[in-house]
Image (cartoon, rainbow, N blue to C red):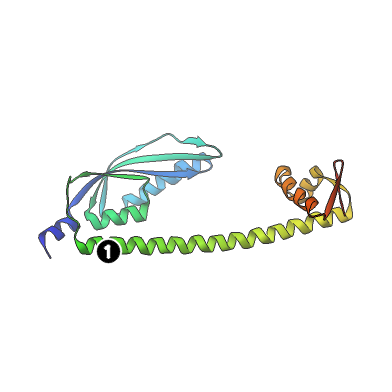
């Protein structure tokens, strides 16, 4: 193996990286980030020199917290694996200033990247198919629930919301569609079957 190749694969690389967790509730986000960092510390090919945690911040309905890590990673192969495995928000290589990436290392990196991108693409397509299936069936269930309720009794939007368990604002969009399709009608605040 050439000296440059050995150097790139085995040289210690000093990095600064940010890892972020987003979720709810606040305590779960804080605990999850600490557990995640403890998991990273178990990796024998890297050493965390310093960790600086932010305060948890509310972002809409979710909480966000990040940690800035100063670490040393053993070689470019492990650096690339670190990025794939731990998905940092950002990564800055501090030392060495320059290093050589061999053709096999670059090829392996690109092949790993392509494999992971194809895997993510497959997961996204599967999730989309499942979401489309669930959305279609939920619409059918809600459609039938509204029609059955209105067959039994004339109801207001508020009453339909209580019976179906669907938020009033979201249900109103669905109900308006049924009115436009001439499946139900609205008389004042009361909905009935056509």
Residue 114: in sight, yes or no?
Answer: yes
Percent across and percent down for residue 129 are: 57, 63
Q: Is residue 37 left or right of residue 142?
A: left
Q: Position of residue 85 (x, y in %)?
A: 36, 55
Determine which residue is flagged by label 1.
108
Q: Quadrant of the N terminus?
A: bottom left
| Residue drawn at 19 percent across, 50 percent down | 12
Residue located at (73% from left, 47% from top): 171
Q: Is the C terminus in the top left, top right, bottom left or bottom right quadrant?
A: bottom right
Is residue 22 toward the left or the right of residue 169 in the image? left
- The reply, left or right, for residue 134 in relation to residue 5 is right
Q: Is residue 140 above or below residue 69?
A: below
For mark 1, does the 10 Å Cα neighbourhood hold few (<14), some (14 to 19), or many (20 or more) residues? few
Residue 166 can be seen, yes or no: no
58 is higher (above) or lower (below) than 36: above
In this picture, is 111 found above or below 155? below
Count of residue discs: 1
């Amino acid at each position: 193996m050439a000296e440059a190749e050995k150097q790139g694969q085995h040289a210690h690389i000093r990095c600064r990286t940010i890892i972020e967790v987003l979720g709810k509730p606040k305590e779960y986000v804080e605990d999850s980030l600490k557990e995640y960092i403890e998991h990273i510390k178990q990796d024998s090919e890297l050493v965390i020199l310093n960790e600086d945690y932010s305060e948890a911040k509310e972002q809409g309905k979710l909480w966000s917290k990040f940690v800035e890590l100063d670490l040393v990673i053993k070689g470019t192969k492990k650096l690339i694996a670190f990025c794939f495995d731990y998905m940092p928000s950002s990564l800055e290589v501090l030392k060495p200033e320059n290093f050589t990436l061999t053709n096999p290392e670059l090829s392996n990196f690109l092949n790993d990247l392509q494999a992971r991108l194809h895997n993510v693409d497959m997961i996204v397509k599967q999730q989309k198919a499942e979401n489309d299936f669930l959305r279609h069936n939920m619409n059918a269930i809600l459609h039938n629930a509204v029609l059955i309720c209105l067959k039994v009794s004339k109801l207001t939007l508020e009453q339909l919301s209580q019976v179906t368990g669907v938020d009033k604002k979201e249900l109103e969009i669905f109900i308006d569609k049924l009115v436009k399709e001439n499946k139900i009608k609205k008389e004042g605040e009361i909905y009935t079957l056509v």
